[in-house]
Amino acid sequence: MALRTPPRSLLLFLALVVAVGAAVHHLVDGIGLAGFFLFISSIEGKPAWKWFFDAPGNQDSGRDGARSFSWRRLGAQSPQEQRRMPPLG
């Protein structure tokens, strides 16, 4: 769990959840649901998720495979395109 201040939009959403719970006479349930949402939002993403959703890597980052073997972009297919590619070094 990361111990940092949550974004203002999350705090407003949690306050809204507690307010709706209080409006329908379920204050304790609203507080519990807001606490659960706060706990879920504080969980860091797994490294595997970052591999899929971060930008493709380069040679220096060690994530070069994501650049050439990724579904996000198609590499140079023809010999003419391969000649136009920048050098790797």
Image (cartoon, rainbow, N blue to C red):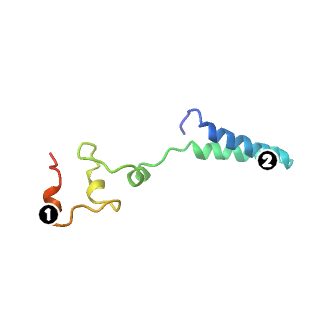
| Residue at image point 56% right, 33% down | 3
Q: Disc 2 designates what residue? A: 20
| Image quadrant containing the C terminus | top left
What whole-number distance in Å separates the C-alpha atoms at marks 2 and 1? 62 Å
Foreground of the two, 52 or 81: 81
Q: Earlier in the sequence, mark 2 or mark 1?
A: 2
* Left or right of 48 in this view: 80: left
Using the rendered view, name the quadrant where residue 77 is placed: bottom left
73 in relation to 46, above or below:
below
* Left or right of 5 in this view: 55: left
| Residue at image point 14% right, 63% down | 80
Using the rendered view, name the quadrant where residue 52 is placed: bottom left
> Is label 2 or label 1 in front?
1
Could you tell me the amino acid type at mark 1?
A: Gln
Secondary structure beneath label 1:
helix
5 in relation to 53, above or below:
above
Foreground of the two, 78 or 2: 78
| Residue at image point 84% right, 46% down | 23
Q: Are marks 2 and 1 in contact (CB under 8 Å)?
A: no
| Residue at image point 62% right, 43% down | 39
89 in relation to 82, above or below:
above
User: Circle 1: is it few (<14), some (14-19), or many (20+) Cα within 10 Å?
Assistant: few
Foreground of the two, 54 or 87: 87
Numbered label tally: 2
- Residue 60: x and y in percent read 24, 42
- Residue 11: x and y in percent read 66, 38
Q: State the mark number for residue 80.
A: 1
